[in-house]
Image (cartoon, grey):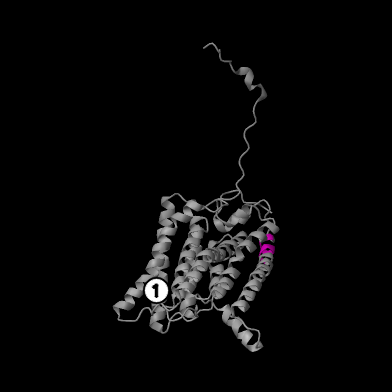
Amino acid sequence: MTIDNAAQPFHRLFRTLDGYRWWRPLLALLLAVVYYLVLSIAVALPVLVLAVVTGDVSFADPSQAQTDIENLALIDAASPVSLLLALGSLAVMLPAVHLALLSTGLRPAGVRHSVAFRLRWRWLWLSSLPALVMVAAGIGIPMLIGLALGQDVLDEFTTDPLLFAGCAVIILLLTPFQAAAEEYVFRGFLAQMLGSWVRYAPVAIIVPTALFASLHLYDAAGLASVAIFGFGAAVVVWRTGGLEAGITYHTLNNIAAFLLLATGMYGTTVNESETASDAGEAVMVIVTTLLGTVLWIVWVLWLAKRKGITRLGGRIPVAPAPPVDPGAHDSVIPLDPRG
């Protein structure tokens, strides 16, 4: 198998690895699924036990137990058990991908981070500013529009303060791992797997984006919003050479969304599939997401250019030093130590 020695964009990094063979990314995908299933079961079992202890699930009535488990599978931001199950079961995709790369010889496993084969922490923190501003705008602007139109934007804070505090701790601790895991799978591993076979970047952007959106149980407006974000994050990864900016945006967006949902001020604490009640609201959701994503992309790419963030890299071999002529010292005139 020919190894690409020239610097490559993020989606082509597998091609620069000494251990790369065309079939290894496919085997890594299969192993990642197996590892994920094992790890997700390891998370689900203790959470299920906790649910029984707390009374969220009762096996006294089998039919009721099934209903309780189905309700537990929904993301209820005001339920610690539901949050632990939902966020924990997604976060384990992180070690699943790492173990799959190690198991199939796609090393160093740091290839999954960026073209530098590591997480570029300084860039990650720098990219958090555009993410923070756009998340705040994405929440605040629709509220201001609703207030201007005389609509009731938010209900009262209905969640018990102590319960909210506990849920907030879980959200703050686990959401970064949940959001990062989705980035590593959809913008990272899947893009690199496809990129190892196909040089054309849009393939590594569009296919994982479509899969990412299809796995969300939302209405048309919600699916469109997820797809827009996924596409934008994939473009940023391609143009900045790593997952850092996408991780910050995804993390801050999800933290803000879960914290607001946990308050009960949306009228519910459950992450419902319906994101728009009518066609007009659906259009507003899609347009807001599109504008926010485009502005975020432009800002991040401008910042990356200004900070000199490289988009190309890989395992580029260092040219060997020229051989030293053994007789070269014969022509050197020794210095007189006396000056």
In magenta segment, residue 210 = no
Q: Quadrant of residue 106?
A: bottom right
Is residue 215 in view from this perspective?
no
Residue 150 at x, y = what percent?
30, 81
Query: Would you say residue 125 is visible in this rendering?
Result: yes
Q: Which residues are magenta?
A: 24-29
Residue found 48% across the figure and 80% down from its top? 220
Q: Residue at x 62, y 56 (%)?
A: 14
Left or right: where 41 falls relative to 202: right
Q: Where is residue 70 drawn, in percent x and y?
A: 59, 82
Work out whether residue 202 or residue 175 is closer to the camera in this orientation and state it. 175
Give the residue drawn at x 54%, y 61%. 201
Within 10 Å of the Cα at label 1, are there few (<14), some (14-19), or many (20+) other Cα atoms? Answer: some
Amino acid type of the residue tagged 1 in the rendering: Val
Q: Nearer the viewer, residue 223 or 22?
A: 223
Magenta segment, prevailing SS (helix, strand or loop): helix
Q: Secondary structure at mark 1?
A: helix
Q: Position of residue 198 (x, y in %)?
A: 60, 61
Which image quarter holds the N terminus? bottom right
Is 26 in the magenta? yes
Q: Position of residue 182 (x, y in %)?
A: 56, 66
